[in-house]
Amino acid sequence: MLWFDWRYCRWLRVLVLREVVCVSFQFSNSACSDDEQFMRLVRRETDVDLLTAALEISRDGQSDVNFAAARSILQRAVSRLTHPVTQAGSDLEELKLLSRYMTEELGLHGESEYLADPHSHYINRVLATGRGIPISLSLIYLHVGNELGIPLEPISTPARFLIRLPADHGPLYVDAFDRGRILDEAECIDLIQDLAGCTATEVRAHLRPADERAVMIRMLQNLKALFGGREDWAATWKVQTRLQLLLPGSWRERRDHAVLTLRAGHFGEAIDLLERSLAVCPAEDRLFLQNHLRQARRMLPECN
């Protein structure tokens, strides 16, 4: 039995590796093949430029993303803030200067209705309109702050994406969605408790820096839910392809990639992915995948 289990695990690893290679090949031959920073995340490299990776993701839903224009806005912010920040007398004053510029000069803010708008995830659109969601707004704060030498950290809590500054007298948090509101830790815990309905202990468990991959995964999962809710399967499939690359060991993402390939109309690819998924799927997903495979086989001749 031990020998059988070992062989099965080795076989499963080989199948997962083949799937990753297949998805990577599809991705490398797509319009996103020059997504340098995103692909660094896929390769698990460190010191990735998260803001550029987010701009690369923005190209999935837009054909006219101007990287140079976005960088120019951010560089101007850094230039304008460099002297005031160096003259600031405290961590709190540095954050106040940053938040004031973001809200008053760039007009960055959040509103509840923006949460359902995919464009509020796209950094170039946020910079153009000022309208964003917690994670996109926070990435802009994070980028400018770090360029200024302010060691900000991304904090991914269940109900609100925040940024944190490990200050001398206790950590300070910035809620970019609420016009750059600055909170101490007690205020931050109260905020997340109110938004998520969880205990203070549960909140504290999430008050740790998110790694770069986790930040991008959260943004992509937001977009997946939004596009899927609209039944925009072509857009959902693009997002899912990225998630599959970042989470190659996740059965859920592998299953969803196979199904969304079908819904996006790529029937030949879907048949291959569904067949390989069925070879390793848990029992509870077998009927679901079999039904989709039958649908893909039925649709393929109609499109030839």
Image: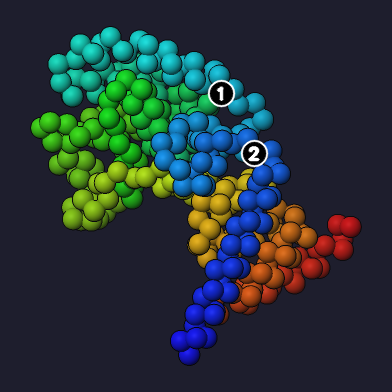
Residue at left 58%, top 65%? 16
Q: Position of residue 254 (x, y in %)?
A: 57, 62
Residue at left 49%, top 83%? 5
Q: Position of residue 224 (x, y in %)?
A: 54, 49
Relative depth, front residue between 275 and 286: 275
Quarter of the image containing the C terminus?
A: bottom right
| Left or right position of 179 against 19 | left
The kind of residue tagged 1 is Phe
Q: What element carries label 2?
A: loop
Q: In this view, does 194 lie above or below 78?
A: below
Q: Taking the image as drawn, is residue 199 in sight? A: yes
Q: Is residue 186 above or below residue 1?
A: above
Q: Taking the image as drawn, is residue 259 in sight? A: no
Q: In this view, does 17 lie above or below 75?
A: below
Relative depth, front residue between 217 and 228: 217
Q: Residue 32 carries which label?
A: 2
The kind of residue tagged 2 is Cys
Determine which residue is flagged by label 1: 67
Pointer 2: residues within 10 angstroms few (<14), some, or many (20+)?
some
Q: Is residue 282 above or below residue 258?
A: below
Relative depth, front residue between 299 and 148: 148
Residue at left 52%, top 47%? 42
- To which quarter of the image does residue 83 belong? top left
Pointer 1: residues within 10 angstroms few (<14), some, or many (20+)?
few
Query: Which comes sooner in the sequence, label 2 or label 1?
Result: 2
| Left or right position of 270 against 131 | right
Q: Is mark 1 on a helix, strand or loop?
A: helix
Whether the residues at callouts 2 and 1 have beta carbons within 8 Å, the answer is no
Residue at the limit of the structure toward the bottom, as seen here: 1
